């Protein structure tokens, strides 16, 4: 009886490199962490700028949700991607090719890049689509910045928005100019995100998803979230992020005094009928992770 042995090295590697790129470019971006484990060749392809340029040409771009999670066992921050299964469930998958992140940094996505602001090195660097570091640079503010870590930062219209305990600041990279935005100071926004040039953050104190339109220079709330707000009324912590016309709202519904910590993720579709008020529709709420704290 003869046996048949599968030899993976005799399959795809025998194809021209352009054909291999076309094949992998058509695979969902969510499968890339798994593909990178197949071989060193596959890992180099999914980390290369060529694969993302090819995906763009083929119209295979996807909106992905990345999460920076602190691993208490080894004491470092690692990047994960939220992958959807065929049955509709979601799970976090580690991206081993990305470097360990500094403590105390703020992170903001701009197109296919993730900018890292602050941290223990107090530098601004960028984690690019190739999943490697570009050379970081140091940007010195010409105004006094206070404690900014708790509040985070966002990008709107090619400008960087940051907040400390007292003020909201705007940095224009092309002009290398810092300014104070008094209208943003009306709210103590934190852990915010931007979608379609509108800033969003969840106000735990008032139990509302607030939004700020920089063109109209006005604050408002997202309508239609009554059912979700019933779940978040005890939330003491929240984080918003945006991807593809959706918001992901992370929150702990149990209250600050409860020892059991549960981080839930609500996916919210945003709509603006006829350019008027912004409405949200919750498409799903999942348990992200949980643990006990003494």
Image (cartoon, rainbow, N blue to C red):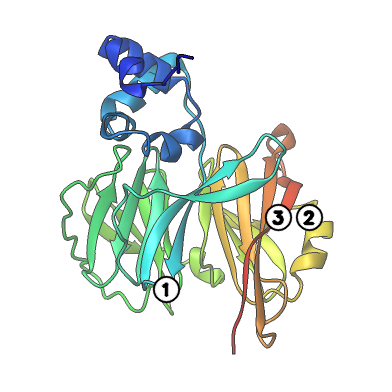
Answer whether residue 146 is visible to the viewer in this image: yes
In the image, residue 51 above or below residue 264: above
Do callouts 3 and 2 mark residues in contact (Cβ within 8 Å)?
A: no
Q: Position of residue 191 (x, y in %)?
A: 51, 64
Q: Tell me the SS state at disc 2.
A: loop
Q: What residue is shown with label 3?
A: 286
Q: Residue at x 59, y 90 (%)?
A: 294
Q: Position of residue 293 (x, y in %)?
A: 59, 84
Q: What residue is shown with label 1?
A: 73
Q: Position of residue 129 (x, y in %)?
A: 33, 38
Q: CA distance from mark 1 to mark 3?
A: 24 Å
In the image, residue 81 above or below residue 162: above
Q: Residue at x 54, y 40 (%)?
A: 196
**Front one among 141 and 47:** 47
Q: CA distance from mark 3 to mark 2?
A: 16 Å
**Front one among 7 and 91:** 7
Instruction: Determine crowd level at label 1: few under 14, some 14-19, many 20+ residues with C-alpha closer than 10 A.
Output: few
Tell me which numbered mark, 3 or 2, is placed earlier along the sequence: 2
Tell me which numbered mark, 2 or 1, is placed earlier along the sequence: 1
Q: What residue is shown with label 2?
A: 225
């Amino acid at each position: 009886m003869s046996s048949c042995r599968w030899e993976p090295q005799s399959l795809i590697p025998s194809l021209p490199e352009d054909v291999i790129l076309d094949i992998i470019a058509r695979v969902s971006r969510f499968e890339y962490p798994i593909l990178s484990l197949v071989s060193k060749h596959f890992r180099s392809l999914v980390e290369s700028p060529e694969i993302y340029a090819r995906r763009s040409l083929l119209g295979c771009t996807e909106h992905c949700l990345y999460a920076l999670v602190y691993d208490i066992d080894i004491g470092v921050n690692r990047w994960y991607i939220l992958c959807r299964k065929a049955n509709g469930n979601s799970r976090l998958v580690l991206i081993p090719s990305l470097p360990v992140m500094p403590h105390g940094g703020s992170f903001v996505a701009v197109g296919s890049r993730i900018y890292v602001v602050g941290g223990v090195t107090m530098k601004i660097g960028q984690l690019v689509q190739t999943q490697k570091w570009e050379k970081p640079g140091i940007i010195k503010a010409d105004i006094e910045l206070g404690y900014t870590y708790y509040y985070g930062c966002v990008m709107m219209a090619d400008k960087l928005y940051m907040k400390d305990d007292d003020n909201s600041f705007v940095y224009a990279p092309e002009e290398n100019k810092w300014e104070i935005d008094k209208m943003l100071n009306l709210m103590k926004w934190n852990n915010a995100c931007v979608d379609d040039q509108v800033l969003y953050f969840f106000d735990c104190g008032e139990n509302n998803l607030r939004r700020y339109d920089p063109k109209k220079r006005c604050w408002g709330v997202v309508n239609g979230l009554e059912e979700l707000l019933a779940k978040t009324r005890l939330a003491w912590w929240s984080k918003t992020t945006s991807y593809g016309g959706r918001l992901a709202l992370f929150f702990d519904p149990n209250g600050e005094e409860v020892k059991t910590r549960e981080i839930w993720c609500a996916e919210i579709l945003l709509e603006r009928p006829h350019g008027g008020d912004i409405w949200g529709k919750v498409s799903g709420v999942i348990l992200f992770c949980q643990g006990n704290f003494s």
